[in-house]
Image: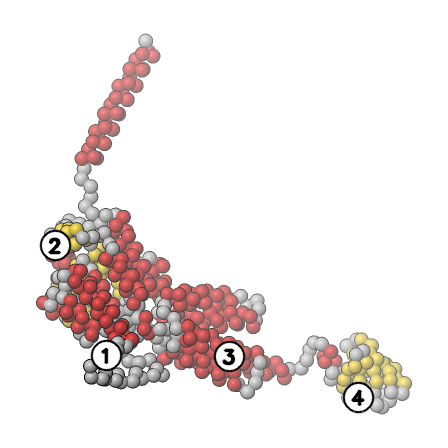
Amino acid sequence: MRMRKARLLWLVVGAVLAAVLSMRVASSAQEPAPPAAILQADITGAIGVAAELQVETVIKRAEAEQAELVLFRLDTPGGLVTSTRVIIQAILGSKVPVAIYVAPSGARAASAGTYMLYASHVAAMAPGTHLGAATPIQLGGAPMPGSPQQPPKEKPAEGEKPKAGMEDKVLNDAIAYIRALAQLRGRNADWAEKAVREAATLTADDALKENVIEFVSVDRTALLARLEGHEVSVGGAKRKLVTEGRAVVEVAADWRMRLLGAVADPNIAFILMMIGVYGVLFELWSPGAIFPGVLGGICLLLGLTALSVLPVNYAGLGLLLLGIALMTGEAFTPGIGVLGIGGVIATVIGAAFLFDPDAADIDIAVAWPVIAGMTALSFAMAAFVFGFAMKARKRAVVTGAEEMIGLEAKVISWNGSRGTVRVHGEVWSARSDREYLPGDAVRVAARDGLTLHIEAS
């Protein structure tokens, strides 16, 4: 009887738990899913591999989380052409609408930033910002020091079609690229061409009037309010943005992006390379020091990482390495300084032409003060090693056969021109042009095998 009551009790408890569980499942199924978030990231400074990685990471996350919108707050003077194209391809291929907002006041979207603004689904600017000046730097910038001046173009003969030079090809390619972006987004293509051909610029209010951007908003809150119900084209399909009540999730750059952004600066890359090379060389000069070798290895790897993401001119890199090799050779083979002077000259020229300016729309080069400082340091290290080697040559020999020369000795026995002497507690055969008495103090003048040539001290 008790067993039946216990079973009945367990059945009742099980039925109650099942009913409660089913009610919870039903209620959770009826609860609406949280609204898709808006992801925001800041892109500041020169456009490079770090910005490229950041844009791709944020867009992939937005697609995975089915976000409503990706908002990039932009402030850039321009950057690498390759990274700019990768970023634009990521924006054009995004399944989530991408808005670019030039902010805060005082920010700019120059050069590469203008291309990115034209590629975005929504282009907006804060008051007091500007965009434009998208002319490639090799066309509109100053020539590199020591570069040959371009000869003036010859006028074609009457009836002859003018030939397109390399500058024309680069310019026409850049114009076609930005016009294609403008036509895709329904923005002012004529002004886009003007920004490339004439390096034209616009303020935020003027850009709105010229149909270059869609909105001018004082802050993010105002911009999101104006984006409510705004229609964009994503993947060929029309879509209305829903921004009201959406949470904004700020996506900060991770350590990889920050590290790449730091080492991808041409000046930092050059300094890391030089520190790395000299750290390794110092370890080779003084084995067992450990710290210079470890520091040099880390800096060298970071410098090589920077060179892998920057447009390197291999002729400049070769000159830089040749300069280091020549100064190292001067340290190991002291002469009249020809190797050291040649190494300094090669280092300066190599550093000046280390990076390819044609691969960026901003002036990408090692600053002259940095070149001067590292060159002076290199010359000082070479001079230090040279002086150290010269001092070492003047020191008395303490090892080998020549160590005996000049030591004091005492005659043990002597007969005619030969005898024995005691040096360093050792008995040696000796010879001389004169005779000595036992106990006389003499000096070792030379050594011939196991026989010492002595003279009076």
Disc 1 marks which residue?
Answer: 162
Identified at 55% across, 68% down, the residue is: 289
**Where residue 223 appears, x then y in whole percent?**
14, 58
Residue type indicated by callout 1: Pro
Single out the mark in the foreground, 2 or 1: 1
- Please report contact status of discs 3 and 1: CB closer than 8 Å, yes or no: no
- Please report contact status of discs 2 and 1: CB closer than 8 Å, yes or no: no
Q: CA distance from mark 4 to mark 3?
A: 45 Å
**Where residue 28 appears, x then y in whole percent?**
21, 35
Disc 3 marks which residue?
Answer: 327
Identified at 15% across, 70% down, the residue is: 191
Disc 4 marks which residue?
Answer: 455
Quadrant position of residue 405: bottom right
Disc 2 marks which residue?
Answer: 230
Mark carried by residue 38: none
Q: Residues within 10 Å of mark 3 (few under 14, many from 20)?
A: many
